[in-house]
Image: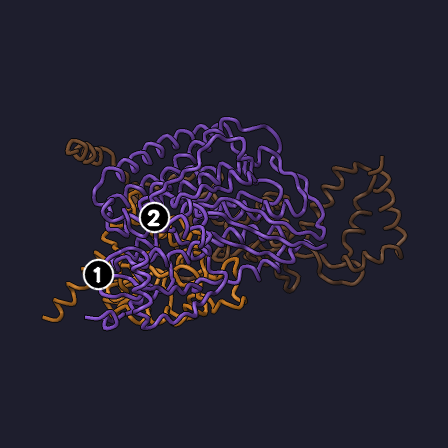
Chain colours: A purple, B orange, C brown
Amino acid sequence: MGMCSRKVYSVPVGPYHPALEEMAFYKVYVEGERIVDALIKPGFNHRGIEKLAMKRSYRRNVQLFERVCGICSAAHTTAYCVAVERCLKIDVPKRAQYIRAVQAEANRIHSHLLWFGVAMHVIGFDTLFMHSWAIREDILDVVETLTGNRVNYSVNTIGGVRRDITPEMGKYILEKLNKVEKGTKYLIRAVKEDLTIKARTKEVGVLTKEEARKYCDVGPTARASGIEEDVRRADPHINYEDFDFEVCVEDTCDVYARIMVRLREALESIKIVRQAIKNLPKGPLMAELTVPRPNEDIGRTEAPRGELIYYIKSNYTNVPERVKLRTPTFVNLPSTKPMLIGDKLADAPQIIVSIDPCLSCNDRVIIIDVRTGKEKTMLLDEIIRRKGKVW
Amino acid sequence: MCGLLCKLAAWARKKSPWIFHLPAGGLCNGCDIEIVAALTPRYDVERFGILLAPSPKHADILVVAGQVTKHTKERLLRVYQQVPEPKAVVAVGSCAISGNVFGTENYPLAGTVDQFIPVDVYVPGCPPKPEAIILGIVEAIKKLEGETRKS
Amino acid sequence: MKVNILKEAAKYFVKPATVPFPAVQPHFPKKFRGPPRYDPETCIGCGACAHVCPSDAITVTTKDGKKILEVWFGKCTFCARCEEACPVDSIKLMEIYSTPSPNKFDFVSRVEHDMVKCRICGKYFATVKHVEWIIKNVREKMGETVSISELKNYLMTCPECRHKVENVPSFRKLLMRVLVKEVK
């Protein structure tokens, strides 16, 4: 049987699919069980946020950008506020920066635990999904006490923060963090010991270091491919230089590595929150605001999914002239393609989930892949051969 | 015979309504994760028999979050048509009710959920607490019950 | 390994993670951000809340000499900026969760105010309570330097007419006195 006679079938996944938490359309081309090509069409969640932002004042935009994504809402407001503060030359007091760090890290812990639960659900391990979400409720209690809401924090504002951490609150948070730490360590142990998880995740969805560099991956996806990069180190925008933490890197490049990176990062975040609450400096919560002048600047932060960039251009009004976002999913999403190619169809959901796609973040731009990807059997066989996998 | 079967179906539906979770487009995921949080150990709606169905064809209640974008409009209608009668729709969150910060005039947005499909219960909040979502589903069950009686 | 499984199983018999929700009401932390409500007693109808609202959930309408402030928390972002902006702490975010309803216009808290007419052009422009509140505050700050009647004369004039303050000598006098006091 010649190579050409093999038939390529396309399997549409989405936009509403039980394996996907959000709507996105994947067209997966399969040859037998093995995936040979993939086409991604996001854009169902496009809301025109950048356009809206150009009509509202700087302060009112904070609440808008918080709703770019409900899972990493703290990261979005932090990056936006940092960008505006750099642009308008506002010096934020240290206490406010520490409170920002606390909520950003609490956000990271909650996001990683959420992701871990979803990843476990996708590989069919629902017990750990429930465990991880039960642990996550504790960190949500922390967030609720800190900010007054479970998902949208609304604490950051231009020039500072709107809520203080009182000593009782600090005590309560530390108490809850002990619980979360215990839970996260339990999850790590479960992942390390359980054979089912290893079987479903090891050597699945491999993204080599070179490919990760080529696709410009960011955040945990890049760190799981052995690239040591972290905005908290490179650009310590909210006093991250004061905290002692480790940048977690794994070099097995597969889904398993991405799980381990995220869980270890959650532990590092707990460390940061503890340090921030312990050494919370005294001082005001808000800086004095300045009058907008024509200027431009970027603010970036390490969102739970990777590097998040905001670009602001100001003029003489209190409305930004241009706001541009670059979310981590936007960079990471194309790299699902090299991960998918050569793997089995049954592994597709966990590979797609493994980059933690936050499509509500991503869908500010409508990308349509113009590649038709039709009967290119010969070429795709070459790809498989290059990956060194025998079919 | 049919009467008995209908009664049995109505009883089963009341005791165990299946929900289908449908993010309708313009939303931030906040409501989605709160709907999923309602299924997890802290709130555990499965103790009431409420189950997340993987397909709209198995569902009794449609839980819609977020407002409708032009991209998802047709798919929303298609999913709604796939849900068998009697059905109820719960709109969760400010976006589903009114559009929230995104408004309704922006170019990618088609409108709020109730402009396209009939909504039975609204749950306000940004996002609503899981408790409120549970109460919303309970309201929808009451509506389902009434409808079965009528038929 | 088996011992571990048994241990885990035993834990879940002892301490359930589930909260008995409908029987026990959930715990709300201090300053939880629930649905906003107006206190009609204290509200002065200045409209500061509508000005800062990020999602335009608060609307101010004037009709037949009445000013109606309405917060529709079906559109609210629950950010508490109205609470921050309110000068008299009238609008408050309740520490409860919002209950669902089949009618989306149930989620409304509204407050109505009588308005005052402009002394010169006869147009409705501000609420009675707002003017009273300003008078009270100015008196507190300025002491007896300005008399109530003088202040009322000034405040009962709509902004457009007040722009012609140069033409009204009594206003000029009043403003000069206030300014001098402030400089001191």
- From the top left corner, tell me how far across and down residue A65 is, in percent: 53, 53
Q: Nearer the viewer, residue A80 or A365?
A: A365
Instruction: Please tell me whether residue C63 is drawn above or below residue A194 in the rendered image.
Output: below
Q: Nearer the viewer, mark 2 or mark 1?
A: 2
Q: Amino acid at mark 2?
A: Ala
- Residue B65 location, quadrant: bottom left
Q: Is residue A372 above or below residue A306?
A: below
Quick check: marks 2 and 1 in contact, CB under 8 Å?
A: no
Numbered mark located on residue B13 in the image? 1
- Residue displayed at 48% across by 62% down: B98
Q: Residues within 10 Å of mark 2 (few under 14, many from 20)?
A: many
Residue C164 in sight: yes
The residue closer to the viewer here, A295 or C107, is: A295
Please give the name of the residue rendered at 32% of the width and 49% of the height, measured from the top-left corner. Answer: A118
Q: Is residue A113 left or right of residue C12?
A: right
Q: Quadrant of residue A90?
A: top right
Nearer to us in this view, C8 or B60: C8
**Residue underneath mark 2:** B37
Kind of element beneath mark 1:
helix
Identify the subunit bearing mark 1: B
